[in-house]
Image (cartoon, grey):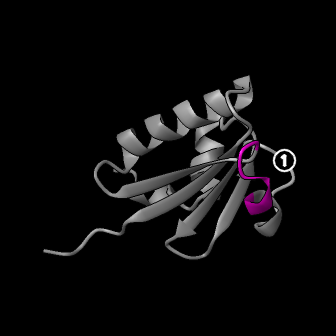
Amino acid sequence: MTRQTRYKFRLYVAGDALNSAKARARLMALCQAHLPDRHDIEIVNVLTHPERALADSVFMTPMLVKLAPLPQRRIVGALSQTELVMQTLGLEATVE
C-alpha cells in the first residue's frame, strides 16, 4: 500500500472579514472533498500576528500558501474559483 501525500496549508486572514471567512470555508470544503484525512491547515490572523505576516511577506489577505508538498504556491483572494485554485495548488492530479 502506498502512502498518500499529506498537504499542508497556511491561510492568512484579517480577523473575521468577509473575504477571510469565505476563504476559510472554501479551503475547508475543498480539503474535505479532495484531500480527506490528508491535509493540515494553519490559520494565521494578521490582525493579531502582524509580525508573522511581515516576516512571511504577506501584504494582502486572504492569502493561502501551500507549504507541502513542494513546490510552495500562493493564492490571494477568497478562493471562489475552485477549479483555478486546485490547478494553481497542483491538486488536479489528486482528483479521481
Q: Is residue 4 left or right of residue 50?
A: left
Query: Mark 1 = which residue?
Result: 60
Kind of element beneath mark 1 = loop
- Which amino acid does the dot numbered 1 rest on? Met
Residue pushed farthest front?
A: 48
Residue pushed farthest left?
A: 1
Residue lying at 33% horizontally and 50% vertically, measured from the top left: 96
Among the 4 quarters of the image, the one containing residue 5: bottom left
Residue 4 shows in this picture: yes
Residue lying at 37% horizontally and 66% vertically, measured from the top left: 6
- Relative to 28, say whether 5 is above or below: below
Q: Is residue 9 left or right of residue 57?
A: left
**Magenta run includes residue 43:** no
Q: Position of residue 75 (x, y in %)?
A: 72, 52
Residue pushed farthest top?
A: 18
Q: Position of residue 63 (x, y in %)?
A: 72, 49
Residue 80 shows in this picture: no
Residue lying at 20% horizontally and 75% vertically, measured from the top left: 2
Q: Residues within 10 Å of mark 1 (few under 14, many from 20)?
A: few
Which of these two is toward me, 37 or 80? 37
Quarter of the rendering occupied by the N terminus:
bottom left
Which of these two is toward me, 56 or 2? 56
- Relative to 2, say whether 31 is above or below: above
- Relative to 94, say whether 30 is above or below: above
Magenta part of the chain: 47-52
